[in-house]
Image (spheres, helix red, strand yellow):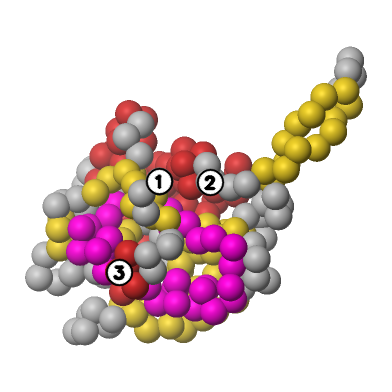
Amino acid sequence: MSVFSVIGHPVVAAWTDRLRSIETGTEEFRLLLNQIGQLLVPSVTEHLPTTNVEIRTPLAETIGRRLEGGTPVVVSVLRAGNGLLDGVLKVLSDADVGFIGLVRDHETLEAIEYLVNLPVLTDRHVIVVDPMLATGHSAVAALDRITQEDPASITLMCVVAAPEGVQHLTSRHPKVRVVAAALDEGLNDSGYILPGLGDAGDRLYGTQA
């Protein structure tokens, strides 16, 4: 299995391209991001190990499966990550949730941490949600913090990724799986993804950059 993968599902692609449009308002943007989060869950969890378990149905006994180690932990990179988080939790409704707050320095493009609130991550499978993988600085900063807790595995879910960000992340965290809805052309001089979808946080919450 490759470290980085793009989901080629037609619904995921169509919903992602609706996100991109300048005609998509805040309400629809939220709904689409929520739905994309749900749609990506099977891909970001397909590596999870399972254990056989005996099950008694109303008609017979059988052997089923349960997730080894329980439901993954979901960590949202604030603030835009919360747009995916709501959709992910519709599928993984019993997941523990953590938050890492990062803001970009617009001059250096480096990530500045302002909040960390995490459940126990040791030996657990972790899904990190952040719609944009641009320079990769924010993702690497979040992963640096998470790997300190020695989780069993880490998967990053994003919607739009730039090649520069993928390269930076995979060079720093080669064992982290990255699942994206789209791989775009690259970054502009300000470190934003082209064609991208703008600032996901601003579009999600109706604020201005």
Q: Is residue 86 visible?
A: yes
Q: Identify which amino acid the numbered label 1 is placed on.
A: Met
Q: Position of residue 207 (x, y in %)?
A: 34, 65
Start and end of the magenta stretch? Answer: 139-168
Mark 3 surroundings: few (<14), some (14-19) or many (≥20) residues within 10 A: few
| The quarter of the displayed image where residue 206 is located | bottom left
Q: Secondary structure at mark 2?
A: loop
**What amino acid is labelled 3 in the image?**
Ser
Point out which mark residue 1 bears.
Answer: 1
Q: Residue at x 23, y 43 (%)?
A: 21
Using residue 8 as the reference point, say whether residue 58 is left or right of it.
right
N-terminal label among 1 and 2: 1
Q: Is residue 35 visible?
A: no
Cβ–Cβ under 8 Å for marks 1 and 2: yes
Say which residue appears at 71% left-offset and 55% top-offset.
69
Magenta residue check for 155: yes
